[in-house]
Image (cartoon, rainbow, N blue to C red):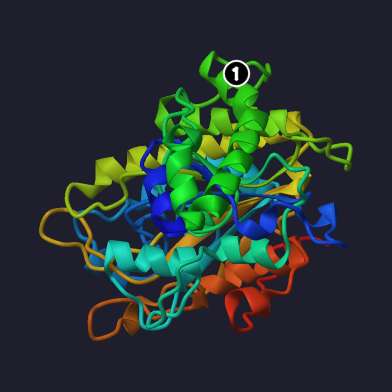
Amino acid sequence: MKRRDFLATAAATGASLWLPKSFAQAPPGASPRTYRNLLILVELKGGNDGLNTVIPYADPAYRTLRKNIGIKREQMIQLDDRTALHPSLQTLMPLWQDKQLAIVQGVSYPQPNLSHFRSIEIWDTASRSDEYLREGWLTRAFEKAPVPATFAADGVVIGSAEMGPLANGARAIALVNPTQFVSASRLATPVSLHERNPELEHILDVENDIVKAADKLRPAVNGAARGGQFQLKTAFAPGAFGASIKTAMQVLAACDTRDGQPKAGQGIAVIRLTLNGFDTHQNQPGQQAALLKQLADGFASMRSALIELGRWDSTLVMTYAEFGRRPRENESNGTDHGTVAPHFVMGGRVRGGLYGAAPELARLDGNGNLPVGVDFRQLYATVLGPWWGLDTGSILHQRFEPLPLLRV
């Protein structure tokens, strides 16, 4: 049984944990300062329609391309003389007005792939469209600059069995259902197999470390399942996404590092959440409106909880997805797979505003898609460089210019 097969099997248990061989002990000189800044990733699974999220209302082609599903002018939330937000994003406006919300437009990559599976693999591994990598981009980051051994885990994935950017090596814990905490140790291999197959020795050693990491986070997860061992005053939005955010905040409370010197079992570098349902090929208006409301309300409660925990200024929240949607609506009142999309970045140290390339609907390519304005790896470079202080080139395999999204 190869290690990668073991990890794939562990992911199927519903809540899986694993770590790389190099993580058992952080190398001499590894600094805990690097990861005192938390990253929260929010996957908009299925590919969100950007043109009805961040709307170029001043472009007359918007109405031409979207006669049926276009947002009415009187319903939009105006940001400036060209751009507006979907009305379901109203609860984001305090963040926008406080200049703690950045919107990066035109995000994709050269020669974009429009397959759900391949494109999210490209985003998760930060590869080129013609390159195939196994490790997630965060896994590579933590291999180059390990998270301190005192931290409870490299990351926690909530609401999905897919490890995504933490795949194949990160010490990451997956909670598919926040009320269930299943340790990968339940897949333990009998000792007799271990004796017959020395290749399993490292797998079993890794498994022991996994159990220890699970035990560090178990109180937070169990507390969240009981309604909150760590009492927060924040009122969380209803629904699965709201529950995932609540669980994330409970886990964070259990791993608090505000004193700057995490004790054993404290600290976490990444939390990843997933909001499903954005593959809106038909009947998009109602479906997307409900999803964007969940996102906005969830972000509002997340901000309140992070402020309550004293972590707002040390947290960066960023959305991502496999792709956007085509500018022209289809015949089913929906949109098909497209290239670029806008993404949201928020936090107490975010320099709010509009970034990237605003959509130019007169410049569609031969397939009816918008050209790429910002390479998604520039977002990752912003996390790796300015946020964490890491060498972006060695992790992303080439240099990408960080975006000016952060205050000094």
User: Total marks drawn?
Assistant: 1
Q: Position of residue 165 (x, y in %)?
A: 51, 58
Q: Quadrant of the N terminus?
A: bottom left
- Asked if one can make out residue 144 in the rendered structure from this viewpoint, the answer is yes
Name the residue located 88 percent from the left edge and 62 percent from the top edge.
Answer: 29
Residue shown at the point (44%, 50%) measured from the top left: 196
Residue at (78%, 66%) from the top-left corner? 389
Q: Residue 245: where, in percent of width, then height?
A: 54, 33
Can you give x and y, in whole percent of width and height, for residue 376 in the image?
51, 71
Outermost residue, left side: 331
User: Mark 1, residues whose alpha carbon is within 10 Å: few (<14), some, or many (≥20)?
Assistant: some
Seen in the image, is 185 located left or right of residue 11?
right
361 shown above or below 151: below
SS state under label 1: helix
Task: State left or right for residue 248 relative to residue 130.
Answer: right
Of 325 and 81, nearer the camera is: 325
The amino acid marked with disc number 1 is Gly
Determine whether, in the image, residue 85 is placed left or right of residue 395.
Answer: left
**Residue pointed to by mark 1:** 223
Question: In the rendered image, is residue 352 in sight?
Answer: no
42 lies above or below 30: above
Camera-side residue of 72 and 179: 179
Q: In the image as oriented, which residue stretches furthest toward the top?
A: 226
Going by the image, does 201 lie left or right of 7? right
Is 246 placed above or below 328 here? above
Seen from the viewer's position, the closer of residues 291 and 79 is 291
Q: Quadrant of the C terminus?
A: bottom right
Query: In the image, residue 357 lies at what x, y percent?
Result: 51, 75
Q: In front here: 190 or 232?
A: 190
